[in-house]
Amino acid sequence: MRVSARARWDALWAGEVDPLVYAILRVGVATLVLLRVSDWTAPFLQLDHHAWVSGLDHAPGADPAETPWLEMPLVPGLPSPHGLVAAALAWARLPLAGLLLLGIRARPAALLLAIAGYGLMALDAARYFHHLHLLWLSCALVALTPCDARLAVIRRGGPSAPRWPLTLWRLQALVIYGAAGLAKLDPRWLDGTSLRLIAERFPFEGVFWDAGLGLVGHAGMATAIALWELALVPLLAWRKTRLLAVALGLALHVVLDTTTMVSTFGASMALFLVTFLPWERRLFRTSSRSADPAST
């Protein structure tokens, strides 16, 4: 039986989901921002970015006249990344992340976090990192979700929430994995040349790296990573294989996180993978029980 285009559209965007997923995304993104923008956990928890971040990340510190600075604004004429504008944006991230974590004006806080984060990157494009781009993009996506309630993470019996923000998160995850996999179809990646050069510049170590080198070498590992990422796209898109795909996605990021420095990238992608859990199905079962006359 053919399914109409309208029915397919509604299956993606219409309907309702368990609001818990949006609370998890809010708390998760806020926590990652608080961990990433400074080195305050260094005394008891070492993170990748502590290797190059001292104090508050992006905050103007040393005197530019005494220290050689590289300034590369995204657009000519932007303020200096070592002036008051940069300092204001850098410090604003802390209270905004706190508001987001607590669910106080969460959506405006998430939007302002995205603006502050991308603003700092625009002031000095030389400080661009993929994981930061993903983090500020996640803040922008959180701003589109109904996550305003305080302590919503522990409220399981509340009203339902619209599905369309969840669909945006899922589509973004498919774009990330698809783009990453397609970019690796370059012959220089597939034959292991690019991976070998990256490993010479950045530290690669751990049980997965050593085992991979011994079994299949650079070319085999490079090909496996490309196929792994590409396979996640259809597996995540098809409802019947989503749980398997979530497990495979988490396994991929465990391998990457234990092999080299990827900062918050793996944790950010874990939040994207959470969106593929059956939030619609859980809501349906809850609604069915509530509507059952026998339950009253």
Image (cartoon, helix red, strand yellow):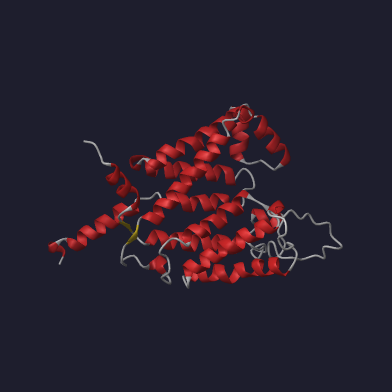
Q: Is residue 6 left or right of residue 42?
A: left
Q: How many marks?
A: 0
What residue lies at 55% left-to-right and 39% top-to-bottom?
180
What residue lies at 50% left-to-right and 60% top-to-bottom?
28
**Residue 27: x percent and y percent?**
48, 63
**Residue 61: x percent and y percent?**
77, 66
Decide: is 183 above or below 292. above
Is residue 264 visible in the rendered image? The answer is: no
Decide which of 239, 138 is in the foreground and name it.
Answer: 138
Q: Residue furthest right?
A: 66
Rendered image quadrant of residue 119: bottom right
**Residue 105: x percent and y percent?**
48, 72
Decide: is 283 above or below 185. below
Decide: is 159 above or below 201. below
Is residue 63 visible in the rendered image? The answer is: yes
Quarter holding the N terminus?
A: top left
**Residue 17: x percent and y percent?**
33, 57
Quarter holding the C terminus?
A: bottom left
Decide which of 93, 28 is in the foreground and name it.
Answer: 93
Rendered image quadrant of residue 80: bottom right
Q: Is residue 133 left or right of residue 62?
A: left
Q: Is residue 210 left or right of residue 251?
A: right
Q: Is residue 260 left or right of residue 268?
A: right
Q: Residue furthest front?
A: 77
What residue lies at 61% left-to-right and 64% top-to-bottom?
116
What residue lies at 56% left-to-right and 64% top-to-bottom?
113
